[in-house]
Image: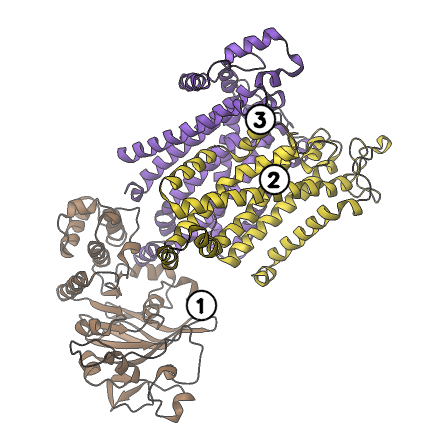
Chain colours: A yellow, B purple, C brown
Amino acid sequence: MIKKIFSRPTGVFSLLVLATIFFIAVFGQLITPQGPNEINVANMLQPPSPEHFFGTDELGRDVLSRTILSAQVSMQVSLISVSFALFFGTAAGVMAGYFGGWLDNLLMRIVDVLFAFPVLLLALAIVAILGPGIGTATFAIGVVYVPIFARVARSSAVSVVQEPYVKAAKTVGASPLRTITTHLLPNIAAPLIVQTSISLAFAILNEAALSFLGLGAQPPTPTWGRMLFDAKGFLDQAWWMAVFPGATVFLTVLAFNLLGDNLRDALDVTVDRKESK
Amino acid sequence: MIKYVARRISHMVVVLFGVSIAVFSLVHLVPGDPIRVALGTRFNEETYQALLVSSGLDRPLLEQYVTYIFGLLQGDFGVSFRSGGPVSEVLFERLPATVSLASFGIILAIIIAIPLGVIAALNDGKAADGGIRVFSQIGVSLPDFWTAMLFILLLSATLQILPSSGYVPFGEDPVQWLRHLIIPGLTVGLIASSIITRYVRSSVLEIINSDHVRTAESKGLSRSRVIRQHVLRNALPPIMTISGVQFATMLGGVIVVEVVVAWPGLGRLVFDAVATRDYPVIQGVVMLIAVAFLVINLLVDVLQARLDPRVLR
Amino acid sequence: MSAVFGVDNLSLKIGKNQILREVSWNVSRGETLGIVGESGSGKSMSVLAASGLLPKFRKNITGDAFLALESEQQSLLDMPSSEIRKLRGSRIGFVFQDPQSSLNPLMTVEQQLSEMIKLHMKLKGKQLQERLEELLELVGIADPERRLKAYPHELSGGMRQRVMIAIALSCDPDVLIADEPTTALDVTIQAQIVELVQNLQKRLGMAVVWISHDLSLVGQLADRIVVMYGGEILESCETKQLFANPRHPYTQALLASKPTMDKSIKLSTIPGSPPLTTEAVDRCVFYDRCQFKSDPRCATERPPLTAVGGDESHLVRTFCEVP
């Protein structure tokens, strides 16, 4: 599988970008040329130069340093929220698919209800209730992706449950937990892996959107979304403030999407994407 | 057909019931007293009591819910904590801006996506297909608000041919309305088109390799007739479904783009309401969008049943 | 009797895979030619290639295919695709395997049936309506007016295949290609469809090419049979001759694997599986599964197609002398 991904240019590209992003997310503090909040008003709104590759913002802060350090929040929020969605969504979907009946009906109606809200609007409403911050943003993004994983897991589980060997395991009295862990999960892993990669892409977009709206991590923590919000006021004076952080978000999202595509081809599964955005 | 529509409507009512409970709960899930939280530093006992009575938050929960549902049925979305006026007024004041943006976006998206998707499918695996897939992959990955900022940089800050933000109602000045619409419209249209292009490509590809298209070829029909009558016609129902979903998503999903270009739509409204903790307004926007989403889905399903007789089975 | 449709030395190579190699057959007016083979043997491909239904692989095809029009033979492979389109449907009618998927699910029977008549025969209005009803009656569909308004999913499998046959026959073709037309149907329906095609052939006098994996079925209805394997013709002769005196080990094995009512005879199978992709090899294409291999050349040389005992109507491609 890994070999197959490495055999394609888009696969290599996505792995390279993601490796870089992970690296700067973990070791950001060690490699930034300047502190993210070092204010130098004398040096404000400087275009890209050898001292400041990405230029400086309206307070004279180094855009490159802030871009690098923002990776940390973005990765943290999206990884935790998607793990949350993966865990609870899969649990709900597998139970619905395995037990069927009223439980299936109830869980799927809840999923239908959640799907009636656009992803960002739902996340926004949750943050509005709980108050802005990195924790609530993570929780909100996690919640909005639960139904997607529930659907993917359920549809895979339903088809696996029909398989003779699963029916046989049920007939000989294997406990549900055992049947689910030994037969179901390994068989539905492939579509879930692909969905995880695609959801990470959208989680990064949504984290950036929430931060842009001031509902994500609060200052002084730098985030891509917040940097872009600040850049909005200086579009006609300082294009670099908008272009560099935005391009970094775009590349990261693109890399997760390409990875998802390559995983899908390598694992040979089909995933519905229309409800992710 | 009638039976099918009735079944779809009853399903929608069940989901709407769930949606109403979810939206109703919103204000009750706020830790602490929502009115107190909303008023913040503006707090004074008189305003507080007035809001408590007009919002009905002092009454028993069940009574509140029943009142809420009956209010909704009559178009009453409650009272704004901020202005004290009815939420429905603000909602319908902001709706046209969002609808015009979403309509412009979806039309643009379909105009771009259908030809691109068809060309990609007809050239499966060739250079044109590769290029279109790259376009689509890029579009799906672009943050919408950043894209809007890039358009402002290009069309407004650099070329100075379009205004960078703001909104003019169509009735006031159609030309200005369009000039202001182009940047946000291009943004949401391009991004939606990349998603729809994928669907068009995969639907057309699946149909083009199907047995009935081989039958059509065996009849000696011209290539263009085979494509039009037997491929595109059959690809229409799935394309319509995804376009409907995209349109519904745009209605509630262009929040950040609206904030970037100062577009006085529902997205901008909900953004301001979150900042001021005006919970009834948030509830109103969320409810309105969810209802719109469900109704659009219903319409798409019914239209699909008209186009594909197998759906009714 | 002169041939009306056929292929001559037809080869098709896609990448490394030799899909067809030097395939020749023809069919005359009023005659039924059976082409028998397993899946992947190339039995359908020679017909699809000949009638221009493999446009993607046009460049990979060599040899020739012809159609006799007013006693003049036309080479189909030299023809521009717009010309060959005019012949498809009007001169060559097609019935495919699965009537469920071969009909457009979103068009009514009437729309699908009239498409070709409008195009090739230019009928309109009342004449068209009469032709449609006449065709449905011809293929044994009762209540034509109601059936014309139906969508394919509202019809049974057998009924759908009758509609396919009506479409194929709608412009009075000279040749009817029946590509496994009964494989997806129940046995009783199968028999009805076979009988229908036989009757129609008698009435209309067209040539029929019947493609199937089922040798006993083809044995019942074909005048001549071509046995294909791995993209090559292994044996071809008149039906009676094939059953009485099969000369190829593969044909013999096929005949032996036909179940009989006598329970004492064990049903025999052909060991191994057919080649999925035939790379050009210098040996007999059936070599791996052959139980004779009685000639040293079997493994080193590709046997030529030779006449059996000087009889030019019975050709076989083997070195083996079989009992």
Residue denoted by label 1: C59
Residue denoted by label 3: A129
* Relative depth, front residue between B219 and A198: A198
Image mark 2: chain:
A
Q: Amino acid at mark 2?
A: Leu
Q: Secondary structure at mark 1?
A: helix
Q: Are marks 1 and 2 in contact (CB under 8 Å)?
A: no
Q: Are marks 2 and 3 on the same chain?
A: yes
Label 2: how many residues lie within 10 Å, few (<14), some (14-19) or many (20+)?
many
Please report the residue visible at 61 percent of the width from the left and 39 percent of the height from the top: A205
Q: Which mark is residue A205?
A: 2
Given the current orientation, which residue lies at the most extreme top position? Answer: B46
Q: Secondary structure at mark 3?
A: helix
Determine whether B68 is above or below C26 in the image: above
Q: Secondary structure at mark 2?
A: helix
Determine whether A256 is above or below C272 in the image: above
Locate residue A200 relative to residue C20 in the image: left or right.
Answer: right
Which dot, 2 or 3, sits closer to the camera? Answer: 3
Quadrant of the frame with the N terminus of chain A: bottom right
Q: Amino acid at mark 3?
A: Ile
Please report the residue visible at 71 percent of the width from the left and 46 percent of the height from the top: A25
